[in-house]
Amino acid sequence: MFSADSVVILDFETTGLSPNLGDCAIEIGAVRIKEGVVVERFQELMNPGWPISGFIEGYTGISNAMLREAAPCSEVMHRFADFMGEDNLVAHNAGFDKRFLDAELRKISRTYPGKFVCSMLLARRVFQDAPNHKLGSLVDYMKLPSDGSFHRALYDSEMTAKLWLTMLSDIRGRYDIASIPFSLIQRLLKTPKKSVHSFLETWKT
């Protein structure tokens, strides 16, 4: 049984919003969690092959000078595919990150066997009273310790990991579920918000 507290949590910084419009990754950051503990980290910049916009430089803090010294996307993504292995995957606003992961791996003819879920969708079910479900807002809402800058891939991954483990702890404590399989999270994300409580009450029995 795959456990929800043993996953790879990842984040991309990119040249824009859509690989279908020609955008690509400029940084990948990830943490591997085993039984609720961060045991490994991955972070690399990657050179997209052209200059990024001033907006992206300002948004991420990643400069064109930094990217000129970085390895090409293909090299970095081969290393990241090896890092992922067969683990299941988590990202905040996972639809965005999954599009870029799939696009970058397709370029190098690599795939991954793990399943992908979204921590933002889980937060909408677990923390329904939060003012919104952006990563920074949830970190503030849950008073999670933070000491870096958002919109850098490794930092966002680490903060998502803290949020993820906090949500799993909340589910365990509130519903007396000792061990949370990844399949429970997959099913929970398909459950309407109004039905979350009854779903988890039923699961524990």
Image (cartoon, helix red, strand yellow):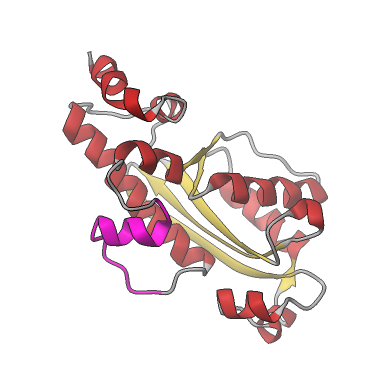
Location of residue 117 in the rendering, given as x and y in whole percent from the top left corner: 50, 38
- Is 49 left or right of 175, judged from the image as shown? right
Q: Nearer the viewer, residue 99 or 158?
A: 99
Would residue 155 be visible to someone looking at this image?
Answer: yes
Magenta-colored stretch includes residue 89: no
Q: Quadrant of residue 172?
A: top left
Which residue sits at x=44%, y=30%?
189
In the image, residue 70 sits, relative to residue 20, either above or below, namely: below
Whole-percent x, y for residue 98 in the image: 63, 45
Place residue 201 in its image quadrant. Answer: top left
Q: Closer to the camera, 81 or 98?
A: 98
The residue at the far bottom in this view is 65
Q: Is residue 146 rendered magenta in the image?
A: yes
Seen at 74% across and 61% down, the residue is 24
Q: Quadrant of residue 185?
A: top left
Instruction: List x then y, in percent, for residue 144.
Output: 26, 60
Q: What range of the chain is rendered magenta?
A: 133-148
Which residue corresponds to the image point at 63% horizontal and 79% vertical from the top-left? 57
Instruction: Please give left or right for residue 109 compared with residue 78 in the image.
Output: right
